[in-house]
Image (cartoon, rainbow, N blue to C red):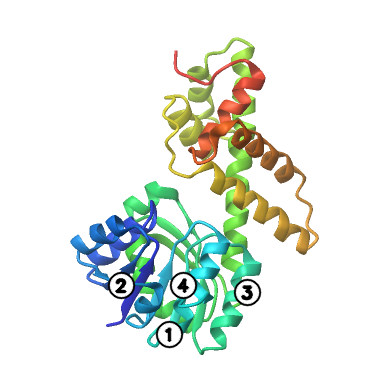
Amino acid sequence: MATYGFVGLGAMGKHMVSHMLAKGLAVVVFDRNENAIREAVSGGAEPAKSARDLADRAEVVMICLPTPDIVEAVATGPNGLIEGSKIKVFVDHSTTGPTVARKLADAFAGRNIVSLDAPLAGGVAGAKAGTLSVLVSGAASGFESAKPAFDAFGRNVAHLGEQPGLGQTLKLVNNMIAGAALVTAAEAVLFGVKAGIPAQVILDALSKSATARSFAVDTLLGEKVLSRNFDFGFRMDLMRKDMRLALSEAEAVKSPMLACSVVKQIFDAAIADGFDGEDMTKVVIQLEKLAHAEIKAT
């Protein structure tokens, strides 16, 4: 049985590791947060002293980290995973964009290590429930090696092809749609509120509509915003980062992104107003300020 390594025990990673351990997989973990390591060890994981130490002990190494710069430093920087003696397959669950995915694949190929980009959809709720979508691209041999772990925390595991970066591209497509859907749905509901219809009535009606019903309407607005909890579990700054990546990658392939540009600016404005690090659903507050109305239960 392969030993799996996991770097990044944050809001997503800690739950993913828990599911892997529950399936009986051998897991070595590393994180800069020692409390996160202790929590994983209490569930059956083995601790590593560094990223390099982890890659000296695990054949399949997975990471889930917040930004491309951190990913590159951990993966290919000094004393990074690429220098490990045992690692055979590298799996990046972060959202870094296809350009970084291709760069990492080239670097690992030089050490005869298979690289997979395997970003996730489903958020913290999906990580907790073990129902994540895992969007994988890279060599089929690496996919088969990592699949027991994917199946432990994922419900929809898709191998998109062997070309590096396909998984990252699809993740950016997913998040662009999610961010734009939230913004446009909130604007539409605020129009209805301003016209005199209670937000609850609007959302109840939309949830039964064959044309307007959506995740943004039912879950993001109908549950997280209407209750004023704003607790979907994905940070505002990370959504803006993904929007910026989408715009950059779309420009590289000469694909227009007019709506994405506007939505990204709305997230920019929310962050400028102090919501950096807050839940992404709080972007609705920015729209409420403009409309002088709120989406809340009455």
Q: Which residue is drawn at 32% across and 68% down?
A: 29
- In the displayed structure, would residue 284 be above or below residue 143? above
Q: Where is residue 58, by image quadrant? A: bottom left
The residue identified by callout 2 is 48
Distance CA(mark 3)–CA(mark 2): 27 Å
- Marks 4 and 3, the one that precedes in the sequence: 4
Most distant residue in the front direction: 78
Is residue 159 visible from the viewing direction of this image?
A: no
The residue identified by callout 4 is 91
Q: Where is residue 27, by image quadrant? A: bottom left
Q: Which residue is drawn at 35% across and 70% down?
A: 149
- Marks 2 and 4, the one that precedes in the sequence: 2
- Marks 1 and 2, the one that precedes in the sequence: 2
The residue identified by callout 1 is 88
Other residues around mark 2 within 10 Å, as few (<14) / some (14–19) / many (≥20): many
Residue kind at label 2, given as amino acid type? Ala
Q: Are marks 1 and 4 in contact (CB under 8 Å)?
A: no
**Residue 75, how many percent across, how many down?**
50, 73
